[in-house]
Image: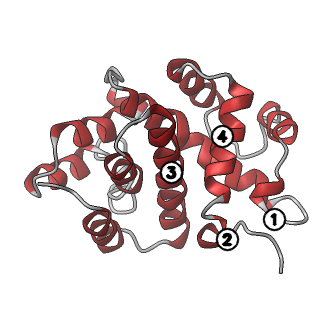
Amino acid sequence: MNSTREDAWNLLTKHTKGEGLIKHALAVEAAMRAYARKFGEDQERWGVVGLLHDFDYEQNPDPKDHPRVGAGVLERRGYSEDIIYSIKAHAGHMQMERRSRMDKALFAVDELCGFLTAATLVRPGRNIAELPVKSVKKKLKDKAFARNVSRDDIRCGATDLEVELDDHIAFVRDAMAQVAESLGLAGHK
């Protein structure tokens, strides 16, 4: 199957109704597309991985099911092995080696996108484009802030992708700023 964004979007919205999870998928898609451009990779393919990485989570939040159930759906629909592998490998509990740059990028951006969203929403302007890296790093040290976000995953993701943490934060922030309107992070008008 030659997976397209339209196919991925339809699958995502069929399985996911929560606005927050859809926005998260859009944020991860934007970050994945940006890294694909940076690395000279296929933006469509990387974007599809970003959109679909958590498409089954709302229906299968238990780690024993997510993303295994979703991987089965993707297999039956004819998605390629590399897309399915990246989606499975992004979940640390699956204990799969992140082999490709796409695998590493998905792991690196997933938790960070959620953290950047949270950090933006507590700022007065609620505009991700204005979110300073310094502020994000300060929030990373605050264990009570966005406590469900793994700081280790964010740091390890940057290391595995071979990018400096500050640069990674700025890069993902800027990618998300490109779709800020759809994420509800464009600030007050």
Q: Residue at x 31, y 24 (%)?
A: 96
Q: CA distance from mark 4 to mark 3?
A: 12 Å
Per the rendering, the mark at residue 184 is 2
Q: Residue at x 42, y 35 (%)?
A: 40
Q: Which residue is mark 3?
A: 28
Mark 1 vs mark 4: in front: 4
Q: Which residue is mark 4?
A: 171
**First in residue order: circle 1 vs circle 4:** 1
Q: Is residue 74 above or below residue 100?
A: below
Q: Amino acid at mark 4?
A: Phe
* Residue 149 at x, y percent in the picture: 62, 41
Q: Amino acid at mark 2?
A: Gly
Q: CA distance from mark 2 to mark 3?
A: 14 Å
Q: Is residue 49 above or below residue 25?
A: above
Q: CA distance from mark 3 to mark 1?
A: 19 Å
Badges 2 and 4: C-beta atoms under 8 Å apart? no
Q: Which residue is mark 1?
A: 126
Q: CA distance from mark 1 to mark 4?
A: 18 Å
Q: Amino acid at mark 1?
A: Arg
Badges 2 and 1: C-beta atoms under 8 Å apart? yes
* Residue 113 at x, y percent in the picture: 60, 48
Q: CA distance from mark 2 to mark 1?
A: 8 Å
Mark 2 vs mark 4: in front: 4
Q: What secondary structure is marked by label 3?
A: helix
Q: State the residue in front, 146 or 114.
A: 114
Colour theme = secondary structure
Left or right of 146? Residue 138 is right
* Residue 13 at x, y percent in the picture: 35, 72
Picture quadrant where residue 163 is located: top right
Picture quadrant where residue 156 is located: top right
Q: How many marks?
A: 4
Q: What secondary structure is marked by label 4?
A: helix
